[in-house]
Amino acid sequence: MRQLNIKQFIFLLGLCLPTLWTSANNFSLYDGYSQVPIIGSLVHGDPKDSSIQASINGHTLTVVFTENLGQVTVEVSRVGGGETQVESTPTPNGVLFYIYDTGSYIVTFALPNGDEYYGEFEVTD
């Protein structure tokens, strides 16, 4: 049986470790959440879309406001009409919505200054 010399061992290690590291990182980072991109229709002031973070995990929509935007009205509605949920919340804060049915949805954020932001997402199960 032939022994590996140090150069061969390091070469093999160099080939295997990046693959193992990437696979481990991808597995450990997957938590089921999918980000919902937020798009704004700016009327007043500076864009605040980076201050609104939304993600969907199964049937739960999580919304987090990272700065004080005032009292924000959040509406979740099914594309094409039907189910609608509305919540008014002070910011910075977070709010959760449980969405019962699968399908395509839109979440809309109405800021007190008249600016509106929205994001589209799917609920699959």
Image (tube, rainbow, N blue to C red):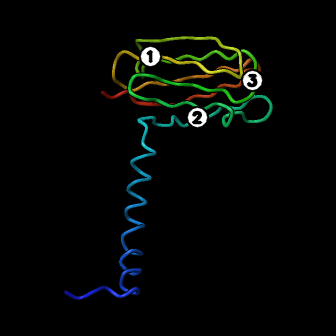
Q: According to the image, label 1 marks what residue?
A: 98
* Residue at the image point whose x is 42% and y is 75% from the top: 14
Of tags 2 and 1, the one toward the viewer is: 1
- Is residue 3 or residue 113 the one in the foreground? 3
| Percent x, y of residue 116 | 65, 25
Q: Distance from label 2 to label 1 (Cα)?
A: 19 Å
Q: Distance from label 3 to label 2 (Cα)?
A: 15 Å
Q: According to the image, label 2 marks what residue?
A: 38
Of tags 3 and 1, the one toward the viewer is: 1
- Is residue 60 or residue 83 the one in the foreground? 60
| Percent x, y of residue 71 | 72, 15
Q: Distance from label 3 to label 1 (Cα)?
A: 23 Å
Q: According to the image, label 3 marks what residue?
A: 69
| Residue 21, image quadrant | bottom left
Sequence order check, earlier mark of 3 and 2: 2
Q: Is residue 39 left or right of residue 97?
A: right
- Position of residue 12 relative to residue 21, above or below, is below
- Position of residue 90 relative to residue 61, above or below, is above
* Residue at the image point whose x is 47% and y is 12% from the top: 84
For residue 59, which numbered disc appears in the image? none
What's the amino acid at mark 3? Answer: Leu
- Is residue 98 or residue 108 the one in the foreground? 98
